[in-house]
Image (cartoon, helix red, strand yellow):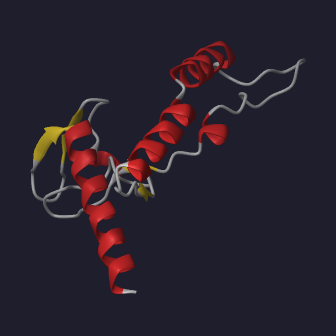
Amino acid sequence: MHENLKIANMTRSASGTIDRPGRNVAAKSGLNRSVLDAGWGVLLQVLAHKAESAGRELIAVDPRNTSRTCARCGHCAKENRVTQAEFACTACGHTAHADVNAATNIIRAGLALRRAAEAA
């Protein structure tokens, strides 16, 4: 399972014009370069091929709110994401590393998609 990231959308240029460039243009271009250098698109293609050849299924999950939703109670709020690395639910008090919390949500969403496909 993986987040169905829209890499082309993630690497769009910062808004603005030559005369009036957008904010943080240099930072955005650096981020774009890092995303493209990481080769996420190629990695996902290889992963899909390997999964298929092994008779496995690769499930793409909608990435919206995976890092803002509590894996314990399901409460979704931007305030739950305290820092880049820290997750603390404002409803139930659950705390975890933000990536671990998001990964739990991604796995659950992927399993739900698989169950729905099997039921259909």
Q: From the viewer's perspective, is residue 59 above or below residue 21?
A: below
Please give the count of numbered marks on the rendered protein: 0
Q: Residue at x 19, y 53 (%)?
A: 90
Judge whether residue 69 can be spotted in this image: no
Q: From the viewer's perspective, is residue 119 above or below residue 31?
A: below
**Quarter of image, res 69:** bottom left
Q: In the depicted view, which residue is nearer to us: 103 or 72?
A: 103
Name, please, the residue furthest toward the bottom: 120
Q: Position of residue 38 (x, y in %)?
A: 51, 22
Q: Position of residue 37 (x, y in %)?
A: 57, 18
Q: From the viewer's perspective, is residue 34 above or below residue 5?
A: above
Left or right of residue 23: residue 59: left
Judge whether residue 62 can be spotted in this image: yes
Q: Position of residue 55 (x, y in %)?
A: 35, 56
Q: Residue at x 61, y 17 (%)?
A: 33
Q: In the depicted view, which residue is nearer to us: 69 or 89?
A: 69
Q: In the depicted view, which residue is nearer to us: 30 or 118?
A: 118
Q: From the viewer's perspective, is residue 61 above or below residue 33?
A: below
Quarter of the figure with the C terminus? bottom left
